[in-house]
Image (spheres, rainbow, N blue to C red):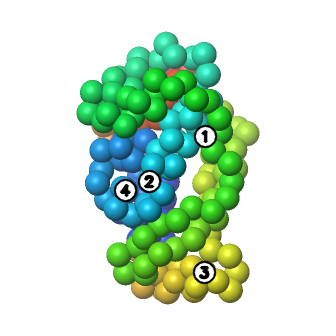
Amino acid sequence: MLAANALATALAPFYTVGTNLLRAAFLDPRVQDMHPGWEHTTESMVAGLRATVGPDTDDPLLNELIGELSVRSGRFRGLWARHDARPKPPGPTLMDHPQLGRLELRYHRFPIPAAEGQEIVVYHGERGSRTAQSLALLASMNADQPARTEVPDGPAGSLDQTADEARDRRR
């Protein structure tokens, strides 16, 4: 993640600048606890990664990440071996928030044309839904928290980078 607003971080503590969401999905137990459809989520993430990288599998940072996840997560290892490749479609995502309960979030991706491989991801509740009301409450509870957009310090090639970030730094 390159940026996250205060509501995103309040929604899920792993939505923070510098977090590799693929790594978090497989290695951070909070992700599995918050996603009742964790199996589907992880399947979709791995297939989406394969669709994104396509034949560009020579990236050393990508290979390090895949190696780490293959060693540390049997689920990742099995999904990666399937070779499924498809982008994650927009649609509903369920999340169990510790304060708000079950939320049904809508998910949309917006590519940034001037930043190849980067995109803005937006989660929201349907207008008038309990989820939208819960998100409004969460936003008001965290109104004094600033948005985070700085990328944390660290060596180029940190495993918390995405493959696209690594390619951008090498250019």
Disc 2 target residue: 38
Whichever of callouts 1 and 4 sits on the residue coming sooner in the sequence is 4
Between circles 3 and 1, the one closer to the viewer is: 3
Residue 18 appears in the rendering? no
Disc 3 target residue: 132
- In the image, is residue 52 above or below residue 113? above
* Residue 31: mark: 4
Residue located 43% across and 81% down the image: 100
Q: Amino acid at mark 3?
A: Ala
Q: Amino acid at mark 4?
A: Val
Looking at the image, residue 85 sits to the left or right of residue 23; the answer is right
Q: Amino acid at mark 2?
A: Trp
Callout 4 secondary element? helix
Between circles 4 and 2, the one closer to the viewer is: 2
Whichever of callouts 1 and 2 sits on the residue coming sooner in the sequence is 2
* Residue 23: mark: none
Looking at the image, residue 89 sits to the left or right of residue 98; the answer is right
Percent x, y for residue 36? 44, 62
Residue located 52% across and 74% down the image: 103
Q: Nearer the viewer, residue 62 or 141?
A: 62
Q: Are marks 3 and 4 in contact (CB under 8 Å)?
A: no
Whichever of callouts 3 and 2 sits on the residue coming sooner in the sequence is 2
Q: Amino acid at mark 1?
A: Gln
Mark 1 and mark 4: Cα distance apart in space:
22 Å
Mark 3 and mark 2: Cα distance apart in space:
22 Å
